Amino acid sequence: WEPVPYFNNKIICDLVEEKYRGIISLLDEECLRPGEATDLTFLEKMEEKIGGHPHFVSHKLADQKTRKTLERGDFRLLHYAGEVTYCVIGFLDKNNDLLYRNGKEVMRQSKNTIIKHCFPSTEPDSKKRPETVVTQFKSSLVGLTEILMSKEPWYVRCIKPNEAKQPGRFDDVLVRHQVKYLGLMEHLRVRRAGFAYRRKYEIFLQRYKPLCPDTWPNWKGTAAEGVQRLIKHLGYKSDEYKMGRTKIFIRHPRTLFATEDAFQVCKHKLATRIQAKYKGYRVKGDFLKQREAATKIETCWRGLMARKEREKRAWAVKVIKKFIKGFMTRNQPACIDNTEYLAYVRQNYLTRLRENLPKTVLEKDSWLTPPPIMQEVSQLLKKIYIRHMVRKYIRGITPLRKAQLMLKEQTSSMFKGKKENYPFSVCRPFMDTRISAEDINIKVLQMIRHEQIKYSAPVVKYDRNGFRPRLRQLIFTLEAAYLVEEAKIKQRIDYSSLKGVSVSNLSDNFLILHVTCDDIKQKGDLVLQCDYLFEALTKLSVIANKQNCIKVVQGSVRFDIQPGREGFVDFKSGQESMVYRAKNGHLMVESTKTKSR
C-alpha cells in the first residue's frame, strides 16, 4: 500500500456537528436559552467557543486582508474544496420549528394521502418542545448515511458547461469552479495513485493474445497463466501492474495505451498477411466461376440500390425546393411556384380545424387562427358552424333554461371584464328567488301583495351614520324595491326614483342604491352587501328596466346620507376580506384578489 495525500474532511464535519462544541450544538443552545438571543449573539458564541479552529474565520477573527471580504454578520468555513461564506442573519428564526405536535396531529388526520404521508406518526405523544430544524436535518442526514452505507452506491457527477443552457458553449471558468467544489481533483488524485485499469483475465487475454507468440492463436493453460506470460513478453515493469485473484490491475494509463497501440499494429499486420495469402492462392474450376458470378451479382445489386437512392434524393430535393419557393411567394397571387404550397396550407388548416372545432357555443373564441389565404373562408366557416351549434343547442334546452341563458347574457353584458369576481358567477345558476314566501313576514306580504313579488334575497344593510351592519331582506316587486326588517318595511324605493346602482370593480359583494332625495325627511342612499350580487342586480335590471343605471366604479363611491350630507365607501384589495370604518370616517371595504380562471 502507498499513502495517498488527500484532505480529510472529518475535521470540517466535527466543526459542524461535534457534540456540545459544534456549530449545530451552539445554534440549538442559542435558540433554547432564555434572554435576548439574537443572530449576532450566536456569532459571538461561535467566536468564543470555536474561534481558535483553523478552518473557522469571522469578521472579528480575520486578518486585515480577509476582513475586507466579510461583512459584520458573516463567518467562513475553509472546506477541502474551497471557502464557503455564511451570513448568520435569520439563523435563529429559521432554526426554530414552530409547528408543534398538535398541529402535526391535525395534518396527520387529513384524508389526503400525500399530506398524511408527510406527517408520519413516529413521534411519541408528549409535550416536549419539538426538535429544531437543524437537528431534524442532522437526524435525516444520519439516516440517509446509514442507508447509503448498507448499499453499494454509484455516483454520477454532472457538470454544467454554461449557465445559458446553450449547445456548443463551454465556460471554462464555470467548469473549473464546479470541478474544484465537487472535489473531483481529489478523486482523480486518489484514482491515479491506485490502479486505474482493471479487467478479468479472460477478457484481457482474449483481446491482447495476438501480441505474444506463446498465447496466439490459442492458449492451453489457465487465463491467469496466459496473462502472466503475455505481460512478461510485453515487458511490463513490476510497479506497473498487479495480479489479483480474478483480475489484472494496471496502474498507469500510458501502459494500457502502449498495449492498445501495439494491438492495433498487430491487427493490421495480421489482416495484411491474410489478404496477401488469399490473393496469392490459385483457385481453379467452378470455385473461380462462382466467385466471379458472386462479384457480378454484388456489383449489379449495389448499382441498383445506388440508383434508387439517387432517384429518391433527387425527388426529395425537388419537393423541398418547390416547398421553399411556395413559402417565399405565399403572399403573392397564385402561380406555378406557390400553387402546390397553397393547396398544402389549405388542406393542413382544414385538417387541423376539423380536429380542434369548438365543442360548445361558449368556446367560439377558441376558433383556430387561419393563415392569410384562408381568412375569408375561415370567417364563413365560423359563422356557419356557430349558427349550427346555436340551433342545435337551442333545440335541446327547456324554456326555463332559455330564461337562465337570457339572464346570464344580461349579466355578462354588465359585468364581464369589469368586475373581478365575475368569472366565478358564471357556473352558479340563477334562482327565481332566494327567500321563499313562507320566510317573509305575513304583515309585509299583506302590505305589498298587490304589487306581485318578483325576487327577494337576504342582505346586510350598513347604517348611514356609524356604518353598523343590520340583517335585512331586499324584495323586488313590479313597482318598487323594499328593504324589510322582520314585520317592518324600513324603506320603499320606487323604480322611478332610483337614479342608479354603484358596485366596485373588485371581488366584494357591495352595492349602493342611489335614490332621488328632495326632502330632508326622506331617507338617503342604501349601502348593502349581498352574497347573490350578480343575480340580484340582473333581476333588478330586468324588472325595473335599469340596465344602463348600473355602474362599475374604481376606488371610492360617494353616496347621499340625506340632502346636504354625503358619505363615502372606499374599496381596495387586501390580504383578507374585511369591512370597517376608517379614521377619515369613510366605510372601508377590503377584499381579497381573486385569480382569474
Image: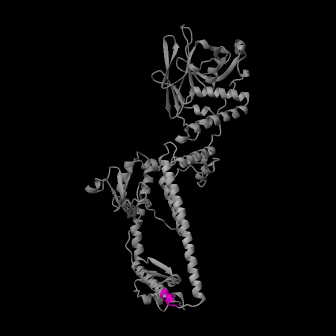
23 versus 565 height, above or below: below
360 with respect to 96 (left or right)? right
Residue occupying the point 40% across, 84% down: 239
445 with respect to 89 (left or right)? right
Query: Is residue 433 visible in this depiction of the protein?
Result: yes
User: Where, by quadrant of the figure, is residue 441 drawn?
Assistant: top right
Name the one closer to the observer, 168 or 540: 168
581 versus 101 height, above or below: above
581 versus 284 height, above or below: above
Which residues lie in the magenta part?
Answer: 274-281
**Residue 35 position in % (x across, y down):** 42, 45
Quadrant into which the C terminus falls: top right
Magenta-span inclusion, residue 494: no
**Residue 595 position in % (x across, y down):** 54, 37
Name the one closer to the observer, 309 or 150: 309
350 with respect to 59 (left or right)? right
Query: Is residue 509 visible in this depiction of the protein?
Result: no
Residue occupying the point 45% across, 60% down: 19
